[in-house]
Amino acid sequence: MTQILPSTETNQPLLYPHNNSNPTITSMDVQDSPRKSYWRCSKQDFFPEPSFKDLSSYRTALFQICPRLKDRLLSRSTETHELVTLRRESENPMQKCLTWWDLMWMSFGSVVGSGIFVITGQEARDNAGPAIVLSYALSGFSALLSVFCYTEFAVEIPAAGGSFSYLRVELGDFIAYLAAGNILLEAVIGAAGLGRSWSSYFASMINSKNPDFLRIKIDSFADGFNLLDPLAVVVLLVANSIAMSGTKRTSFLNWIASIATAFIIAFIIVVGFIHFKSSNLVPYFPKGAEGVFVSAAVVYWAYTGFDMVATMAEETKNPSKDIPIGLVGSMSIITVVYCLMALALTGMVKYTEIDPNAAYSVAFAQIGMNWASYLVSICALKGMTTSLMVGSLGQGRYTTQIARSHMIPPWFARVHPKTGTPINATLLTTILSAIVAFFSSLDVLSSVFSICTLLIFMLLAVALLVRRYYVKDVTSKNDSVTFFVSLFTIVGSSIGVTALWNSGVRGWIGYVVASVIWCSGTLGISLLHKHRVPKVWGVPLVPWLPSLSIAMNVFLLGSLDYQAFLRFIICSAVMILYYLMVGVHATYDVAHQNPKETEAEEGR
């Protein structure tokens, strides 16, 4: 049964399911009549807001930048706005074609790339030893905490914007913009890094002594940007073209490839346990607990990629059921698989004899199975390929929702009527990532990518606490003060633990004091009244698990070097400059162009 309500904008009915808190948008709600060309391109399509009508209008807007910025800092979006109003910017609906089965294999294809094959050997040999299994377990637990937060939001707000939409609703327009900028930066850098990795791995299969032999060296360019990589560009174009052709088609291809990878990984684990020697696990902690934690911060990157799957909520048939099973289920399985693969490696070969560059291939060679090294190489290449395809799906949908809000030109919000995919948005991230991959080396790319990912994970945990315990103009003044003091206590104590660890302090007193402060902050929030309770699926043990997620993400942020933070600050400064010159005016115009119509929309 559905309740039919009139639309004030399109004179067409909107369908609101009785048993779902999120309204369902149909094709007649977003399609123009008569239908316009998808590829039309004019100034009005890129900058339709009044502030950009002409030079005089733009000058007037710049003089009003302070009150407009204040308005944007204090504004909050709503679930209805993200789920209904903004979708009209796309003109055509995305197709609801995904189930929990699709999401589970998408998560597997996005997360399980080459990282497990490269990082495991390096960290087992240099830091954790056989205890690399515990490093993967700790990192997997940290990733699972972030997955919990993503899942609750994705069920409650199944919009294509993922974390951008969630933060816009809970933390406001400006914080969401900074997250949006970091999301786009992460998308571009992540795809470029995967393209370069694919190229390096393929080249090493042909010529193991020179993984750069397929690249073009330009001596006049600066180091880190002087090895041009045309193969990486080709790989990116092919993977993203598949993603643009259709969501279900991409999901099917990912499923086939991921099934093959699962069989290869099962083979690696079985062979590893057949040749397992318990003597190889001694000593289990060659560098103590410090080695385990150092490796945990590194192997965490083998778990990233699940956030891209959360952006597929708009195309999921039954978000309340499919998303929890698809995301939480897949990440739990992936954590177990990673631990088993690490245990198989350290059981086959003494950790001191592991080859840090090709751990699994050399391990198979040492037991007389040289041919198995080709399986490892195929599995790694396949993993990077599916990561690129699923990543392209997620990047396009992130960009679409950001464009729907007019933070970037709404031309990128359009969904193609035939493919049901955001081709314009995907083309944007494809072209940018191809340019970056063509010039930039992996070490330059990885440090910026790391901060973007962890910052968004931390902000999402903060947003979840805000969602549960604070509602503007509803929460009492005393509860508001208690909440924000407790929240700052959680963040401050997390920074304190990180500072102690990075300064080399290993005595237990400082860590106990910081932990007690963290517990007091979390306990302070737990004693407050919850203003919102999840309707279908929610994070368990709130506020303890989100608080722990904040602490672990802050700790991982502290493991990065200062150059990563310097690059991040520079990129953020450029984003803020763009926001002050363009974004704040576009979003202000959209929010205030027709207040009565907006109020009617929100009321419905």
Image (tube, rainbow, N blue to C red):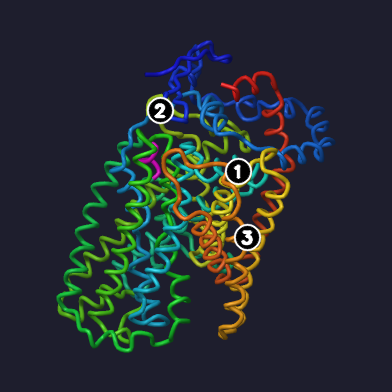
Residue drawn at (79%, 27%) of the image: 57
Mark 3 Cα within 10 Å, few/some/many (few <14, many 20+)? some
For label 3, the SS is helix
Q: Evaluate if marks 1 and 3 touch, with contact meaning CB atoms under 8 Å apart.
A: no
Badge 2 amino acid: Asn
Residue drawn at (49%, 12%) of the image: 12
Q: Which mark is residue 170?
A: 1
Mark 1 Cα within 10 Å, few/some/many (few <14, many 20+)? many
Query: Which quadrant would the C terminus be assigned to in this image?
Result: top right
Question: Up-down: is 489 above or below 129?
Answer: above
Query: Which quadrant would the N terminus be assigned to in this image?
Result: top left
- Residue 583 percent coordinates (x, y): 68, 39
Q: Evaluate if marks 2 and 3 touch, with contact meaning CB atoms under 8 Å apart.
A: no
Q: State the CA–CA distance, disc 1 to disc 3.
A: 24 Å
Name which quarter of the figure residue 238 lies in.
top left
Q: Which mark is residue 264?
A: none
Residue with the mark numbered 3: 568
Mark 2 Cα within 10 Å, few/some/many (few <14, many 20+)? few
In-front residue for pair 519/102: 519
Q: Main secondary structure of the magenta part?
A: helix
In the rendered structure, the answer to whether residue 503 lies left or right of residue 335 reads: right
- Residue 82 percent coordinates (x, y): 55, 33
Would residue 264 be visible to someone looking at this image? yes
- Residue 487 percent coordinates (x, y): 64, 57
Q: Evaluate if marks 1 and 2 touch, with contact meaning CB atoms under 8 Å apart.
A: no
In-front residue for pair 404/100: 100
Q: Which mark is residue 19?
A: 2
Badge 3 amino acid: Phe
Highlighted range, magenta: 240-244
